[in-house]
Image (cartoon, rainbow, N blue to C red):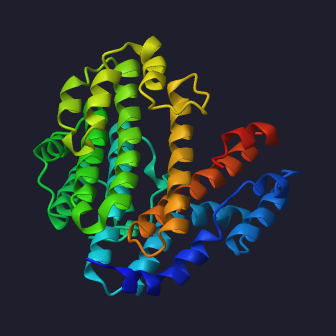
Amino acid sequence: MSYSTTMALLMYHIRREFYKTIDTSIIDTLSSFSRENILETFHMFEKQKLDYEDIKKYIINLPTEFSKKILKITRDPDIKELIEAYLLYYEFYNLNTMLRAKLSGHNESDLFLFNYSSTSSVEEIRKLEKIEDIKNLYIKIMIHHKLKNKNLYNTVKTLTLSSVSDLLLYSSIEYYQNLLSKKVKFGHNFTSLVITKAFYEIALMLAKMKFLSGIDVEGYIHSLTFLEDRQNILVELFVSDRDSFIKKCIDLKVIPPNFIVTDIDDIDKMKNIILKNKAKNIIIGNPLDPSTIVAMIILREIDMKNYFSIIGGFESGFSFEKVRQMLIL
């Protein structure tokens, strides 16, 4: 099915968002690295004049605000379905964050939550005081999206602090399975982009489970058939121990030769650089492909991370050189 007409109507909004994307010019604009400098830089890229404290509230919603704008504009049911499937990530994130905070006794009033939910407002979610109420909302969202993963359902129903890692992994698996169920409609670019994102994010989660918590991840890997040939790569990666994991990543070209990676955490930045380049290439080379919408959301996610690195680094007293190394450019 061709979505050229629908995408042509959306391209003005996508390009307008694309021109805000952070690039290497931010290094020059942030040279003095002061609070005033950060405000000026934010205004230059986002075309928004905000107080310093308001910037934090604004940047966390960069991906969802763009997504909701496209949802409001488009009349194509397939495009709406695609965006809502992608936004399920933020619904899971909000509830996972709330549940982990409640179970660990953390004061959830200061939690960053994304301003999106398909079944209720974020304000209503914040007011949920009982763990059981959050679990019920979780199940409600699964029903709304027609999700039937028994592992996720059972983990939510019986959740304890010790099983939070299972919740994070199962929700991620179900999220990507659901998103990739749209691949027949949206084609190669969409499938390649989403599988790349899913592979690296799940690989990082598995690595932390195995090498930090000592959890056997073999059973989880066998369920990841939606990753196609990359499932076999995961099997090979996790035969190794932590010391040889990075080397195995290099040997299997999980880490491209132009990247220097010495620790598992370095893979996260590398993943975002790979996704940023892939997303930009889709938007520039295939502007009328529906994958452009997902690509643009990913770019806004990366912008959000960059802004938080800048603000977090500044507030922690880091030098600009250290913050520059944290940026995904």
Relative vertical location of residue 59 with respect to residue 13 in this rendering, above or below? above
Relative vertical location of residue 55 with respect to residue 7 in this rendering, above or below? above
The spot of residue 166 in percent (x, y) is 26, 35
Q: Nearer the viewer, residue 296 or 301?
A: 296
Q: Nearer the viewer, residue 132 or 171?
A: 171
Q: At 31% across and 34% down in the image, what residue appears?
A: 165
- Residue 88 visible, this orientation: no
Q: Is residue 145 left or right of residue 267?
A: left
The spot of residue 292 in percent (x, y) is 45, 68
- Residue 241 visible, this orientation: yes
Which quadrant would residue 211 be assigned to in this image? Answer: top left
The spot of residue 18 in percent (x, y) is 59, 69
Q: At 22% across and 45% down in the image, what residue appears?
A: 226
Q: Residue furthest right?
A: 32
Q: Nearer the viewer, residue 198 or 49?
A: 198
Rendered-image quadrant of the N terminus? bottom left
Q: At 38% across and 86% down in the image, what residue appears?
A: 5
